[in-house]
Amino acid sequence: MKSEEMSYHSPLVQQAMGLHNASIGEMRKARILEIRRRFSKHESDTASPAITASVLCENVIHNLNHLKLHKNDMSAFIKLKQYLTKIRKY
């Protein structure tokens, strides 16, 4: 829910629907949306170089944290290498 929609609900509902109760995927989506809001040049901008580089950095951070927990996850390691290669191109 958007923050404008949340303001009409009671504090208990706001607390239950907050990001501190969200899953890892929902928190990651919220961080990516915040990055897009912060670096967009206009309202419908989703692919400017600043946004793309910032989202790639967020993906790298997410994969590094995942690899700290799951050291033998080779698919995450390969994906991390792909993200780093994309960042080098920017």
Image (spheres, rainbow, N blue to C red):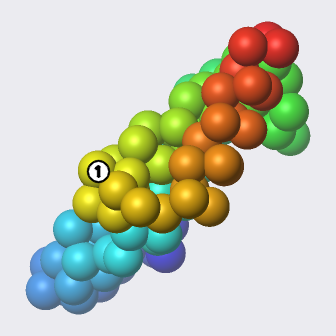
Which of the two residues, 84 or 32, is positioned nearer the viewer here?
84
Q: Residue at x 56, y 59 (%)?
A: 74
Q: Residue at x 73, y 38 (%)?
A: 82
Which of the two residues, 9 or 54, is positioned nearer the viewer here?
54
The picture quadrant where one finds residue 14 is bottom left
The picture places residue 12, in percent across and down from the top left corner, at: 13, 86
Q: Is residue 4 visible?
A: no
Decide: is 9 above or below 58: below
The picture places residue 45, in percent across and down from the top left corner, at: 84, 33
- Amino acid carrying mark 1 in the image: Lys
Which of the two residues, 57 or 40, is positioned nearer the viewer here?
57
The picture places residue 33, in percent across and down from the top left corner, at: 59, 48
The picture places residue 37, in percent across and down from the top left corner, at: 61, 36
Q: How many marks?
A: 1
**Residue that mark 1 sits on:** 68
Q: Residue at x 53, y 37 (%)?
A: 60
- In the picture, measured across the screen, residue 55 lies left or right of residue 52, that is left
- In the picture, measured across the screen, residue 68 lies left or right of residue 15, that is right
For the C terminus, the quadrant is top right
The picture quadrant where one finds residue 71 is bottom left
Decide: is 57 above or below 31: above
Q: Is residue 80 visible?
A: yes
Decide: is 17 above or below 67: below
Which of the two residues, 74 or 12, is positioned nearer the viewer here?
74
